[in-house]
């Protein structure tokens, strides 16, 4: 679990650094920060709902937020709340979403910097 937390914190640091230096446009840094905050909150909410046998957050919602740039918050939520980190099918899709997000941002930044 420590590696998840450390990777999430490193991603947040990179996000802040890239935004502060102008590599990321401000709107993109703000979007990723907002998506991460929502993701983190939903992981906590879903963990509590699971413990109380209440209505859960759909996995697709969590995956979509990761794909949309909220994966650092999702990763931190997995570590802090110890939630969804053992479910292999979920993790497989989660890491595909992370890879797709990072790749799409890299392509977008390359195109915008021309």
Image: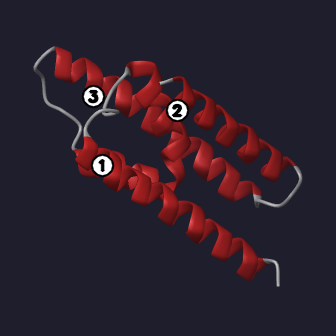
Residue that appears at 18% across and 15% down:
51
**Camera-nearest residue between 90 and 12:** 90
Residue lying furthest right: 21
Q: Earlier in the sequence, mark 3 or mark 1?
A: 3
Residue that appears at 72% across and 82% down:
111
Tell me if I can see residue 58 in this picture: yes
Report which quarter residue 103 is drawn in: bottom right
Q: CA distance from mark 1 to mark 2?
A: 20 Å
Residue 41 spot, x, y in % from top left: 42, 29
Residue 3 spot, x, y in % from top left: 56, 30
Residue 77 spot, x, y in % from top left: 45, 29
Report which quarter residue 54 is drawn in: top left
Quarter of the image that includes the C terminus: bottom right
Q: CA distance from mark 3 to mark 1?
A: 11 Å
**Camera-nearest residue between 94 and 59:** 94
**Secondary structure of residue under mark 1:** helix
Residue 78 spot, x, y in % from top left: 41, 30
Tag 2 residue: 4
| Mark 1 crowdedness (10 Å alpha carbons): few <14, some 14-19, many ≥20 | few
| Mark 3 crowdedness (10 Å alpha carbons): few <14, some 14-19, many ≥20 | many
61 over 84 or under it: above or below:
below
Residue lying furthest bottom: 114
Q: Earlier in the sequence, mark 1 or mark 2?
A: 2
């Amino acid at each position: 679990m420590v590696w998840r937390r450390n990777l999430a914190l490193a991603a947040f640091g990179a996000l802040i650094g890239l935004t502060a230096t102008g590599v990321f446009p401000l709107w993109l840094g703000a979007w990723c920060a907002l998506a991460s905050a929502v993701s983190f909150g939903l992981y906590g909410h879903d963990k509590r709902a699971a413990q109380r046998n209440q209505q859960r957050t759909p996995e697709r919602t969590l995956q979509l937020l990761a794909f949309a740039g909220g994966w650092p918050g999702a990763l931190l939520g997995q570590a802090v709340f110890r939630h969804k980190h053992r479910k292999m099918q979920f993790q497989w899709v989660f890491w595909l979403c992370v890879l797709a997000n990072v790749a799409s941002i890299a392509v977008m930044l390359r195109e915008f910097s021309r």
